[in-house]
Structures are given as structure tokens and as C-alpha cells.
Image (cartoon, rainbow, N blue to C red):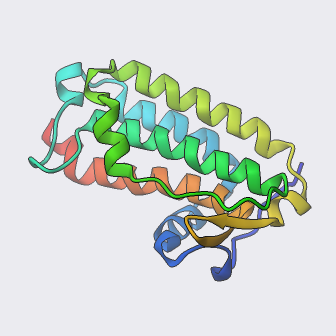
Amino acid sequence: MLKRISLPAADEYADFYTDYIQRASQRDDIYTALPDQIDELRSALGHLSNTQACFKPGPKEWSIKEVMGHINDVERVFSYRLLRISRNDPTPLPGFEQEDYVHMAGFDDYPPDDLLAEFEHLRRANIIVFQHMNAEAVDRRGTASGVAVSARALIYMLVGHVDHHMASLHEKYLPNV
């Protein structure tokens, strides 16, 4: 197991993901951030009633449950990309349309606790995989959404993606429920 995963260089990910990488880099240790985010999400959202979790800050915005479901979808998509790339699979990986995924999923019908439990299970499974990656696997690069990306960057992107949405939840959602 690697003790630390260094910050990815700018050529290891698409410009679109810069915010995620920057957010993740503000964490002291990427390895401790991964399990910490399980507790952070549960602490922020675990007390919400079903009605509160359906809150939307605007008519075209996602509900809290839809944000949580989106976080879970991205956890799956990014971790699948990470698995393929870290295993040296050269197959270019397609992108996905997040709006379509959220729309088709029906997350507002899920109990909030199921969405939180789903994240915890996905993240804990990912942590086990990451703990067993060597430096060569972390350094590998592949193509996702038509752009080069490293396994290292994907680990940072997973953390940064959650932090991005947590900031939005704390700013636009939770003060209003």
C-alpha cells in the first residue's frame, strides 16, 4: 500500500476537473479523506426527513436526494474508470450524461438512508481497492470522455466531487430545510 498519493499534474486530467482536484488537494491526506467523507455526508444529511431530503432550491435544481444519488452514480462511474485504467486496460471509456442519469433514476423515491448507505458501501469497497494499489497502478493513464486521465487523478476527483457537492449542499440546500 502506498503511504501517500501525490497530487496529480495538470496533464493527468481534463480542465473540467480542476475544481475537484483543487478541493481534494486541500485535504491533509487523500487516504483519510476517503472514509471521512462517509461520516461527513451522514452527519450533514442523516438527520433529514424524507420531505426535507426532497427539497430543491429552485425548480430546475436537483433535490437533496438527487444530489446524493448523483454522488453515488459518479462514485460508480469514476471508480469503474479507475479500475480499468489502474489495471492497464487501454480501452477508451465513454462519458455519461449526468442529467439523464439523475432524471431516469427516480432518486426522490429512495429513502434517504438508502442513499447514504449506498454511498458508504461504494466508498468502502473503493477504499479496499485503493489500499492495494501500487505506485505503477496509480500512475497509469487511460482515456475517459475522450480525454487522458490517470488513476491518481481519479482518486482525487472522487474526493473533490463529494467536496464540491457538500459545499453546494451547505450553501444552497441545508440552510433552507
User: In the image, 65: left or right of 146?
Assistant: left
Which percent across, then down, holds residue 129?
Answer: 78, 40
User: In the image, 84: left or right of 124?
Assistant: right
Whether residue 67 is visible to the viewer of this picture, yes or no, is no
Rendered view: 46 above or below 11 = above
Which percent across, then down, holds residue 117?
Answer: 50, 23
How many discs mark residues in the rendered view? 0
Rendered view: 161 above or below 116 = below
Quadrant (top left, top right, bottom left, bottom right) of the C terminus:
top left
Frontmost residue, 30 versus 126? 126
Whether residue 118 is visible to the viewer of this picture, yes or no, is yes
Q: Residue furthest left?
A: 59
Which residue corresponds to the image point at 59% horizontal and 51% vertical from the top-left?
A: 78
Which percent across, then down, holds residue 68?
Answer: 38, 37
Which residue corresponds to the image point at 82% horizontal and 66% vertical from the top-left?
A: 139
Which residue corresponds to the image point at 51% horizontal and 58% vertical from the top-left?
A: 95
Rendered view: 52 above or below 154 = above
Q: Quadrant of residue 48?
A: top left
User: In the image, 44: left or right of 162?
Assistant: left
Which percent across, then down, holds residue 72?
Answer: 48, 38
Rendered view: 12 above or below 28 = below
Which residue corresponds to the image point at 20% horizontal and 52% vertical from the top-left?
A: 172
Frontmost residue, 157 versus 24? 157
Q: Quadrant of residue 3?
A: bottom right
